[in-house]
Image: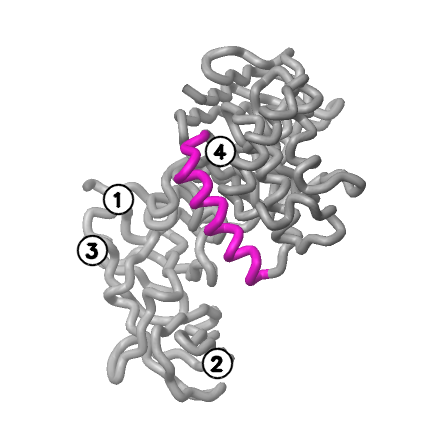
Amino acid sequence: MSTVQIRDVRKSYGAHPVLHGVDIDIADGEFVILVGPSGCGKSTLLRMVAGLETITGGTISIDGRVVNGVEPKDRDIAMVFQNYALYPQMTVAQNMGFALELAGAGKDEIKRKVDHAAGILGLEPLLDRKPAQLSGGQRQRVAMGRAIVRDPKVFLFDEPLSNLDAKLRVKMRAEIKALHHRLKTTIVYVTHDQIEAMTMADKIVVMQGGHIEQIGTPLDLYDHPKNVFVAGFLGSPAMNFLDGVIVGEDGAFLELNGAGRVPLPAGLRCAAGQSVIAGIRPEEIGIADTGGISAEVLVVEPTGSETHLAVRLGSQEITVVLRSRIALVPGEQVHLSLGTAPLHVFDKETKERLPSFS
């Protein structure tokens, strides 16, 4: 078993609080990603799990053992850093086996484990090279191999792909996910990139300002965000937000400020006259031949497989993603189909998702 329990964990630097009582349960073999904007406390929390930061309050347990006062080397974890942290004077094989050498392992055991990790990561032809002779992706694989040879209970990744170019990040995402599927080891992974979180995680922890906003599977958070922050953070392009007011005797419609009226999801708990924020994913909006809501095209961005539009809807601007190519020019009027688009409705004041009867 390789479980991690984080209970009411707090962190302060002097009088400045950074984490405000965080609770997370991580199951054996689970791939959990901590995501959020810079400064939200995700890397600090990861370093506390690793033992590189002291805990101001609360407990962190690995396999039921509280590790608050346990040295990093005795926690049975392995950490992969953003900057690789490889020894430049050592070969790939020496870098990967150095921790085992410090632990007193024999040469045969070190070679066996290094060769095994190199085979998993495709590093066999590079074992005699030094870090300066490697690409960024190869260096990151070496850093991962150094963690694998230790056979830890928990892998910790601190923004490991942020130094790579976009194409290589996509490749490394697939490699890390395949590695997790093969090793089935518990992984706690920190990133500010919501695409990494959506494509790799079993469970996402969305953080802001030292608090947890929501925990769930990627699709659950995408489809059912609990507040405006989570809704806007997950998704690329980001969710559109439109101000509106609930109208109708039974509160069945949403009057978008200066843009028209659309039906509300059935069973929504709301009252006529209530001010709300409506969230609509860009890919859920279509172009109608007739009817719909009139909008002015501001920008057209063809990407090949998709066409991204920036349009003005009443007094507000939104993004539309079309799964086809379409000939439009700035200044042209289009009719947007919003009536069938899934609406996410949030209270204007609290920014929390409105509950439903279902």
Residue visible at 63% across and 55% down?
A: 164
Residue that badge 1 annotates: 269
35 or 292: nearer the viewer: 35
Residue that badge 4 annotates: 187
Q: Is residue 177 left or right of residue 38?
A: left
Residue that badge 2 annotates: 300
Cα distance, mark 1 to mark 4? 39 Å
> At numbered mark 2, what does the secondary structure look like: helix, strand or loop?
strand
Magenta residues span 166-185
Q: Earlier in the sequence, mark 2 or mark 4?
A: 4
Please state which of the two labelled residues, at mark 2 or mark 4, is closer to the viewer: 4
User: x and y percent of residue 84 in the render?
Assistant: 68, 42
Q: Earlier in the sequence, mark 1 or mark 3?
A: 3
Residue visible at 36% across and 40% down?
A: 217
33 or 149: nearer the viewer: 149
Q: Amino acid at mark 4?
A: Ile
Cα distance, mark 2 to mark 4? 40 Å
Please state which of the two labelled residues, at mark 1 or mark 4, is closer to the viewer: 4
